[in-house]
Amino acid sequence: MTQREGSTRIERAAKGSSLLPLLLFAGSMLLVPHTAAGEAYRVAWPWIPRLGVNLSFLLDGLSLLFILIISGVGFFVTLYAVDYLHGHRHTGRFFIFLHLFMLSMLGLVLADNVLALFVFWELTTVFSYLLIGFEHESEDSRKSARQALLVTGAGGLALLVGFLLLEIATGTYEISRMVPVAASLQEHPLYEAILAMIFLGALTKSAQFPFHFWLPNAMTAPAPVSAFLHSATMVKGGIYLLARFHPVLAGSAAWTATLVPVGAATAVIGAFTALGQSDLKRILAYTTVSALGIMTMFLGGQLAPSLMAAMTFLLVHAIYKSALFLVAGIIDHQTGTRQLEELGGLARSMPVTALGAFAACFSMAGFPLFFGFVGKEIMYKGALAETMLPHLTAASAVLANGLMTAVAGIFLIGPFLTGRSGHSEPKPEACANMCGGPLLLGSLGIFFGIIPEFVGRYLVSPAVASFHAHMEQVKLELFHGINTPLVLSAVTLALGAGLYLNRKRVNRAVCRTFQVVGLDASEVYDAAVESVSALGKLQNRLLQNGSLHRYFAVVAAAFVLITGYSYLRTTPALPDLGALDLAVRQWLLLLLLLGAVGTVVVTRSVLLAICALGVVGAAIAVIFLAHGAPDLALTQLLVETLTVIIVSMILLRLPGLGGVRRKPGRKRIFDAALAASTGILMTVLTLAVLSGPLDRSITAFYEQSSYLAAHGRNIVNVILVDFRSLDTLGEIIVVATAGLAGFALIHRRGRRS
């Protein structure tokens, strides 16, 4: 089979894989009437029974809304990517990663157990890393993928801590069982810590200030990845988390006082930064950051209109932004550039793409008859209905929406309607698979704008009712009458038009502002990564420099400091030495040990030092024998004998100890002090154990079980072979591996000779 035939087969399989999201979408649509009626479905299987952990999943209005977005956009992205990546040598790998990511997102929004949610959460992080770094030969792709992995992965670890603290506070890992005890959770001493950890996980995933920098940098990914991960799915994971835990953690001043300002700052900063960009995908990336900030801000509210606004805008944004990312990919694919100054007049040569871009941009700008207008109206209604920080919410929403209206004009008018293209020849329209997604998604924005009541009744309201118990009736309507939200919508359009007409001045002001500030979060991240790298190099120079002496010194010093501090903190008094009553033979054995150790320390003869070490080992064997442990004594004696022989064969071929003994005085004093403190600490710990009451529960267990359960009379052998069999097997493997390695080295040396 030729390479071309293999590529064709992969593309056919990839096109066939679009049936997966299509079937998921169709099956989910069948459940829409049931969730609209307030029904929910939950299944659970034992996962870790001893810890009371179940693998449980919950399907309700909230999770169904996300499933429809994931599978619906996933279907269009799959068809789009087949032709977008035509001829790419890693096409098969791309679709494997894409669908594994899709399944991970589905698991995330369905999980009712927080540990399962965390597993799927981290799976989305891993597969997004692989998708962002798909063009792995590019340094920018690798760097962006690594940045997204580190930021969102760190947030995931914080999220795990929050989940474990939640279990401590509520006594369950099931989210559905946490809701009934939510009222008492806010009085729990761990509430603030739980809130902080959950926020860190959600804010990093959804690119909130100051963690927003990773999302625009991830635009090195292919256009299908940006359309799927960075507009419709992955970045909405944090939004889903905040919505799912709203009935568990919301209701406090800390919840609102954190989410509203953070979301407002993210919305305004993202929209302002978008005006200063010239790359189409980076423009869309910063407006995505702004949109995520708006959702976070409204999820900080407590009333149904605010939460309704968050879920409505979630759907609005997923539709128009995925369409615009696909349009940006088509422009790049057909023209070879995404730079605004190089594009113009594309509506004549690419009319279908232009039509999809028109519909998506009008929805983004919030023009009447578009779904974006409905989302904007309910947004302003929700902001004005809140009792805490309503003016900040409303002002931030108006400013961010006005800026996004201007950005919509920049994205649409420049490349499609005015200006001159940087290329003389007109560019052809893309194929149907690529144009169909933006056109249908853009048309969906118009269709939903005409029937908002249907969308609100069957999609948005059931989602809000899933996490807001006191759900009053809030309707999505195209026209609510002449009221304050309508006035704010008009102000938004006027502001957007003014910003567009003065876009060059605004652009210069934005660039000047960044120059004055001189520091952004991305630079802080780079500095942190460089600091960690520098710390690692310093640690490597200090600890991993190849000196065995330093290795032993570090281990011994850490043992003395940590263990000694722990002992003195808990037991400040030294053990009673008066209880020691040594016989004459024990004193003689102790003197023999001291003499052998002293000989090892002072001698310059390698052979004498080896023999003295053997005497130390033999004396310890005698101690075992004197206390009724002949098997241990025999083992110790055999090991010491073998050690003396092997060490003699090795050390006698090395230089003598004269150079070692002539170390500087300060180093010798340090070594002596470290050795003495280690020995004294071990002695004190041993005496402390002997002077106190011994816990014989483990001993009694082995005494009873060795013969009755394991059918062995030698307790030590039974422990090694039966109770600690895996430990013993591991030790045997280590010894065998060391023996094979030694044999290989000797055999290789022999062949060289």
Image (cartoon, rainbow, N blue to C red):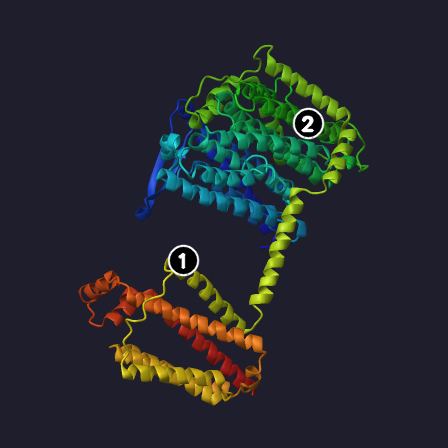
Which of 684/426 is in front? 684
Q: Which residue is drawn at 59% across and 35% down?
A: 231
Within the image, what quadrant is residue 331 found in? top right
Distance, label 2 to label 1, CA atoms, is 60 Å
Quarter occupied by the N terminus: bottom right
Circle 1: residue type? Arg
- Quadrant for residue 465, please give it: top left
Instruction: Say what secondary structure mark 1 lies in.
Output: helix
Q: Left or right? Give the position of 207 relative to 499.
A: left
Residue 25 image offset from top left, x and y in percent: 48, 32
Left or right position of 409 against 478: right
Q: In this view, does 158 lie above or below 571?
A: above
In the rendered image, which quarter contains the C terminus? bottom right
Q: How many labels does the image show?
A: 2
Name the mark on residue 569: 1
Q: Position of residue 158 (x, y in %)?
A: 49, 44
| Of labels 2 and 1, the one closer to you | 1
* Structural crowding at the residue carrying mark 2, measured as other residues with C-alpha within 10 Å and reported as few (<14), some (14–19) or many (≥20): many
Q: Where is residue 495 in the image (x, y as percent from the top left)?
A: 70, 21
Classify 339 as above or below 129: above
| Position in image of residue 156 (x %, y %) | 50, 44
Which circle marks residue 403 in the picture? 2
447 on left or right of 407: left
Viewer-closest of 534 and 100 = 534
